[in-house]
Image (cartoon, rainbow, N blue to C red):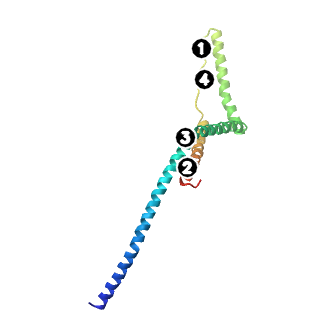
Amino acid sequence: MSSEVEKAAEKLAKLQAQAERYSTPLAEAHAALEAARVAETERQAERRKQYSRDYLKTYRERADAVIQDGKAAHERFKELISAEPWFIAYAEYRAGREKRRHVLDAAQAAQTVLGEVNTIPEQRWYESSLLQDIVKLADAKATEIGGEYDKELTAERDAYVKGTD
């Protein structure tokens, strides 16, 4: 055999010996890692179940609390919006429509009292796009706030499941 072949064979033998020496600890380390992963998955599954059991015991109180928060926010909204100059002006504009309805109703009643044929037009109602725009913006903001709350609930659950709560 040539010296190059002998060197390569020698190197291969050394590497095989090293591989054999490390293969058992390496296999054991892989097995330990897999066992730890399985144990962690089982632990988290049990914690997820425990969180779910606990959550189901308190969801009514949580739901009631967020409804109460919503009611308080609605009252605050009504107070704040009622004080806004643009809202006052808009309400006055809408009141004009209501006043017109009363005028038309009174005129129709007068014709009825006089025995005349009713020639007074009916009130025409139409939707205001301003209100639709406000509702659309409020719904979008509510969806955003709800999404943030969902993230908080998810983080709370995940922290509990991972044991970092």
Left or right, 147 with respect to 82, comes to left
Amino acid type of the residue that numbered disc 2 sits on in the rendered structure: Arg
C-alpha span from label 1 to label 2: 67 Å
Q: Earlier in the sequence, mark 4 or mark 2?
A: 4
How far apart marks 3 and 2 lie (CA) works out to: 13 Å
Distance (Cα) linking label 4 and label 2: 55 Å
| Residue located 42% across and 64% down the image | 31
The quarter of the picture where residue 28 lies is bottom left
The tag earlier along the polypeptide, 3 or 2, is 3
Residue at mark 1: 118
Distance from label 1 to label 3 (Cα)? Answer: 63 Å
Q: Does 20 appear above or below 50? A: below
Identify the residue position indicated by label 2 in the image.
Answer: 157
Residue 124 in the image, given as x and y percentages of width and height: 59, 25
Q: Residue 65's spot in the image, x, y percent?
A: 63, 39
Q: Residues within 10 Å of mark 1 (few under 14, many from 20)?
A: few
Single out the mark in the foreground, 1 or 4: 4
